[in-house]
Amino acid sequence: MTALLQTTDLTLAFGGLVVANGINFSLEQGERLAVIGQNGAGKTTFINICTGLLKPSRGTVSFAGNDITGRSPRNIVRRGMARSFQLPQLFLEQTVRECLELSAVARGGKLSSWNPLAAGSTRQEIDRMLDLISLRERQHELCINLPEGQRKLLDVGMSLMLEPKLLILDEPTSGVSTEEKHGVMEILMRALDEQQVTAIFVEHDVDIVKRYATRVAAWISGAIAADGTPAQVLANPLIQREVLGE
């Protein structure tokens, strides 16, 4: 069975500083992978290489059986890999519904002044997505008025409108209140399951990792130092000392 995402000897150096050090990695369809590590450990660099924002010095990235090394971010999105960022990327002066409409037409590359944002079939898709991310009641609200947790949900909803096979989430609970974060993650995980989307999420909250990840990869100094189930990785003495600070 071909891995959904696979990297071979993935290496990136800036002068004498190695920020990705020969990473061999594979991700199977349906996994929920949590990526953990201290700031500067290489997590974001790895994701930026996989999504086309950085080009490796050496090695390859394959997605769904195709070599995507050095491809542009737009090309990679078209192939089925989407990403949501730590700070939600929203059109703040548009409504919740309009943001989803923009994502829907962007998916097909059909956005123009001559095309309506939402045809009949698209309206049904958007209604379904509003229900999935629990924002139906706020669909006509301007995004600028949403609390952080709902901004995160909308950001993911916009990504899911692109119909990805893999969604990479950068700290999905960052900036979300303690009272909200589990509710936000429950909605996100349910939406991913409903859409049958594989997920990688960068996360610093150990409780979130324990509860929602099926697998954990821990980064230290530009390399994966431990990879396994949450119980295995979080019990590793090296990870407890160097990543969790215990």
Image (spheres, helix red, strand yellow):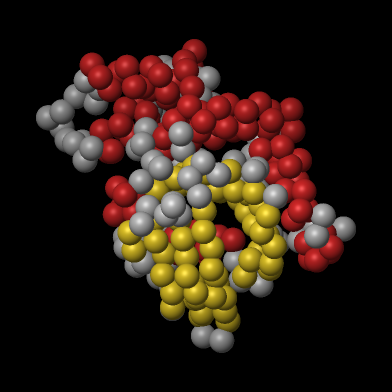
Could you tell whether 125 is left or right of 87 in the image?
left
Whether residue 29 can be seen here = yes
Which quarter of the picture shows residue 101? top left
Q: Is residue 216 above or below residue 101?
A: below
Residue, x 47% and y 65% (percent of image)? 7
Which quarter of the picture shows residue 66? bottom left
Camera-nearest residue between 61 and 176: 61
Residue, x 51% and y 85% (percent of image)? 15
Q: Give the x, y percent position of residue 123.
A: 30, 18
Q: Is residue 179 above or below residue 167?
A: above
Whether residue 92 can be seen here = no
Q: Is residue 185 above or below residue 125?
A: below
Which quarter of the picture shows residue 217? bottom right
Q: Is residue 234 above or below residue 129?
A: below
Residue, x 46% and y 60% (percent of image)? 6
Q: Give the x, y percent position of residue 184.
A: 62, 29
Q: Give the x, y percent position of residue 83.
A: 45, 47
In the image, farthest residue toward the bottom: 16
Residue, x 60% and y 66% (percent of image)? 42
Camera-nearest residue between 155 and 127: 127
Camera-nearest residue between 53 and 210: 210
Could you tell whether 39 is left or right of 167 in the image?
right
Screen quadrant of the C terminus:
bottom right
In the image, farthest residue toward the right: 246
Q: Give the x, y percent position of residue 65.
A: 36, 57
Figure label count? 0
In the image, farthest residue toward the top: 137
